[in-house]
Image (cartoon, rainbow, N blue to C red):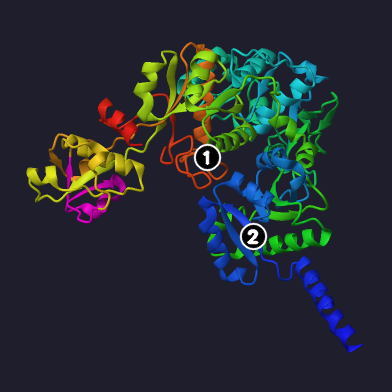
Amino acid sequence: MIKKINFIFPILLLALVEISYAQGGQKIYRMCVPQVFYQDCLDLLNDPSEAGIKMECIKGRDRLDCLELIQQNKADVLAVDPEDMYVAYHMKNQDFRVINEFRTKVEKDAEFRYEGVILIKKSSTVKTLKDLEGLKSCHTGFGRNVGYKIPITKLKNHGVMKVSMDPTISATERELKALSGFFSKSCLVGTYSPNSDVDKVLKKKYSNLCALCENPQQCNYPDKYSGYDGAIRCLDKGDGDVAFTKTSFIKKYFGLWHDGTIKAENNHPEDFEYLCEDGSRKPITGPACSWAQRPWKGYISNSDTVKEKQLLQSLQNRLDKFFENGLKAENKKAAKNLLIEPDLVLHDKNGDVKPKEYLERAGYKDVIERDGSLTHKIKLCVNNEIEFDKCQTLARAAFSRDIRPEFECYLSAEKKCYDDVAINGKADAVIVSGYKFSKILKEYKNLKPLVYERLDSDDVYVTVIDPKLTSEQIQKLPIKYDKSIERSRNAAIFLNLKRGNLGCDNLDENVQDDHIQIVNSKDLNKYKDKMLLCLDNKRAPVTDFKTCNTETFLPNSVFVAENMSQLEKDSYIHAFTLLSDLFGAQGKLPDVFDMFSEFKGHKDVLFSDHALSFVTETNAFSSADEYFYDTILKCQ
């Protein structure tokens, strides 16, 4: 009998431990954060208010990397936008769950972050969506959700506005052309393309889209008829017939509060109505009839972590505490970077909410996919599996964030990539190392660079020397450089060639003395007592690094077929510049996809890790000659 009890007791104890673990008693939840916010996460968890919270920070390259870590069960939770949920849905919808929403305190009971509405004057004769054709429209701005993406999506889906599938013009231009043809005049401010030349061409071609703006020639922010309230003002005080905006700003503009009473003076809400999708109308003093919604931001987890209700509640409780404690933290900036702000509340989701279903409930999946799958794609040719992996990650990020044309990845050998772009037409673009420009341009007459990586002018490699060195010593003393950094090594090879040596063949990699060193210009504050050695053997102060350096790096470039039409080239320029405008080192969303950085332990995958953006003219600092680059290729 005693033996039987002893046998059962460990089993009961194990069961109690498992129950405790399932209820979150011991589990430390792993919050994945992009590397740019990793220290913020650590600072927040080290705050005294977070004592005992049982949360751990897991560093991901960016949000897309974090989604992979969550899918692989190497992390438990990540704060995301609806666009990131769309990426998760396409990775594998059933692996993910949306478990919380970041709602505003003012609209904590609203199912969606905001609702897109159509506002018209009560005196308008409009009875159907079709009746909007030929009217004068007021929009929040180009590329924005309720003022641009949602109207295009809904008017197209209702069959009242045709969006051309003409492959000779870009996806952006197809949408602008459709709006320009549907409405007689509009105010649609913004930057139609990150490339200024393309932006000017589009605004000139579809000038009626700017006709209602305060400053039609500028057609950009600031403009009193732009933004949520500006679109309403365009209808109320300007010449507009219809405005696309959201409900909360209508209430704000007309002084309508949640109890339905009118608090403002000199506004006449009774003169305006919501136009519903079915053609009916509603007074703006009552409930709105929205025709599309944008979901809230939220926390996403994996299906295993929240597979049972008690496990879901355990994680939600932990996040609720983390959020509440974060509001009390001293480091407000760190809290904000992790979406913890005083005007927000955390709303727990009930049950099994997959990303696809979450987006479809708001009609937002259709908004992201509004141009369909029939448009021409940029088929980017890559040379190995890691490049293919990064290309696919780039394609997912780009499509979810409205970059068109869509990117498609094509894996092939290097020379075949050049052939397939220049000769066979099986691919549209290939990325070429700056070292190979001259060689490729000679071999392929139909290949031309389209956009170049832009480098930081303060990021160059220089040669620093002891000011006391003689010319003879400069010719003979060994060069100290960092052999683990390709640019440092190449600069040393370049200097060696200029000294009449044989480049990499006799370059000592284990130099200890520092009479002659290759260093980065960003570190020159450590070498104030040194001089720079220029390529003509002259010397200069360390402040002259832009004109006196040993930099050999040439930026990578995207090459396309020279016989491509100008419209296609403009479309590709738009896509690549927008890509770096969002995901580049100085972009708006590097935390979503860190485009110019190490990728899964590999350096310089597709792009240079130290590039900043894409530009249409090269800004290379190298003064190396063709002989040097031939030498570099032989040294590799």
Q: Residue at the location (13% across, 41% down)?
A: 539
Residue extending furthest right?
1
Quadrant showing the N terminus: bottom right
Drawn side of residue 27 relative to residue 631, left or right? right
Q: Which mark is residue 395?
A: none
Q: How many marks are shown on the rendered structure?
A: 2
* Location of residue 555 by image quarter: top left
Estimate the x, y position of residue 343 in percent, counting from the top left. 65, 53
Q: Give the range drawn in magenta.
A: 511-533
Estimate the x, y position of residue 33 in percent, counting from the top left. 58, 53
**Res. 618 in view:** no
522 inside magenta stretch = yes
Q: Residue 588 carries which label?
A: 1
Which residue carries the number 2 mark? Answer: 30
Examine the rendered structure and indicate whether residue 51 appears above or below residue 520. below
Quadrant showing the C terminus: top left
482 inside magenta stretch = no
